[in-house]
Image (cartoon, rainbow, N blue to C red):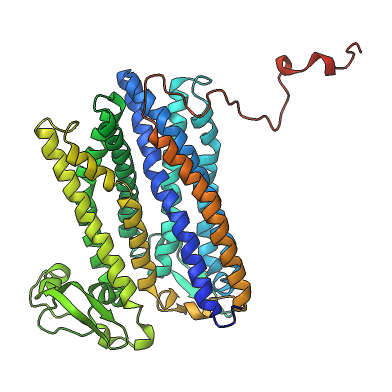
Amino acid sequence: MFDQFDALLLARFQFAFTVSFHFIFPSFSIGLASYLAVLEGLWLWTGREVYLNLFKYWLKIFALAFAMGVVSGIVMSYQFGTNWSVFSDKAGPVIGPLMAYEVMTAFFLEAGFLGIMLFGMGRVGRKLHFAATLAVAVGTFISAFWILSANSWMQTPVGYGINEAGQFVPEDWWAIIFNPSFPYRLVHTVMAAYLTTALVVGGVGAWHLLRERTNKGAQVMFSMAMGMVAVVAPLQIFAGDMHGLNTLEHQPAKVMAMEGHFESHPEGAPLILFGIPDQEAGTVRNAIAIPKASSLILKHDLNAPMDGLDTVDRANWPYVPVVFWSFRIMVGLGFAMLALGLLSLWAGFRGRLYDWRPLHWLALAMGPAGFVAVIAGWVTTEVGRQPFTVYGLLRTAQSASPLEAPAVAASLLTFIVVYFIVFGAGTGYILKLMGKAPHPGETGPEAGREPIRTAGITPAPSVDPARTIGAKA
């Protein structure tokens, strides 16, 4: 039934599907962990109950998002061995240790303190609980550090050698970890996670302000979120520009695809705003462009020459239509976030932050925008790297496992069904929690639900006297 499908295409689609689902949860939990640390810190500093209530309110949501991120991430590791065994063999000596460092540092740190963070309030001191929250927040950042280092090495490989078996082997770990694109990718991705969280928090706050503008918890979360958007959105645009310049230096074909430059422009390249890329014809049809603006942005010179894809072997072209449009979705949403931040500053200056309903509706509509932007950014990065898994060195077609199409299709269909059922239910429950307004006396995830004891000595008070040795029949 699946014989007409290509096994490589199915494997690529399966990886794209699963990583897209997975990427949603870390992009939220990284920012939310830091937000929780800020809320608890403000509570300890000011003693205001509203911060404690918001901490407990968002802690329940964080627990679910974190759990779904861990579960969906486990699947990613298995795919390296099932669908991409050749890549695992060739790049494993470099990628494997980086992934192991993530487990031994970030995952162990998060796992060690997550239980205290979720269930320890009231059982340990306030300072110790705050330290646990900080540890989880730091752990999420360290996790992003190692994963992005591995991905960035695949984009800009350095510090390696190739042994007699054709494997990439490390020669300089510092060069591998801090490869040329890594600092830019790390800053851009982490700030994207903070923006994603701020937009979700702002959207939830806006929803409850639309229903009850005097809700103190909704006011605090909305003002904090809009402040974050106002500060981070312009910084993210600047970081994205720097990342683009770095990409132009190390992956010029990706930038050519992003800009839609099929042809070279020796006297200044136009900025194509919209159009219909035609991969076969090598042109952008019905293009709406600003003359020479692309050269100004990328080279800071209106007349700077810009190479096009006509200087690249056609076999090494990425699929331009996908890269072209995913890039525009990401950039467009970035400027929409900037507009939202500026509008919130104007509303705050006018004293209308909590009662200007058009702003609240806009913030509510922008709530999912961060997720769309990070997925569009990931698509731009990964599809723009094609046709390589290790840029310029190992092609995607040479990285796949020798599987038949029906075998890949069966696992793909299983993933689609299971993911939509399991993660659909989890996401639905998160939305249900968000739909409830924060209130005084908010309870955390531990309220009335003691952790199940799975090891150790059973506490004496909980022992049933009728089951003890020597009990009377």
Residue at 23% x, 67% y is 245
Q: Residue furthest top?
A: 472
Q: Quadrant of the N terminus?
A: bottom right
The answer to whether 242 is drawn above or below residue 196 in the figure is below
Residue at 20% x, 43% y is 231
Q: Residue furthest front?
A: 211
Q: Residue furthest right?
A: 473
Residue at 23% x, 73% y is 259
239 or 9: which is nearer to us?
9
**Horizontal relation, residue 324 to residue 92: left or right:** left
Q: Position of residue 366 (x, y in %)?
A: 27, 48
Q: How many marks?
A: 0
**Horizontal relation, residue 225 to residue 178: left or right:** left
Q: Position of residue 419 (x, y in %)?
A: 53, 55
Q: Position of residue 407 (x, y in %)?
A: 63, 73
Please identify the quarter of the rendering in which residue 400 is found: bottom right
The answer to whether 459 is drawn above or below residue 349 in the figure is above
Q: Position of residue 393 (x, y in %)?
A: 44, 79
Please identify the quarter of the rendering in which residue 288 is found: bottom left
Residue 107 visible: yes
Residue 176 visible: no
Q: Quadrant of the C terminus?
A: top right
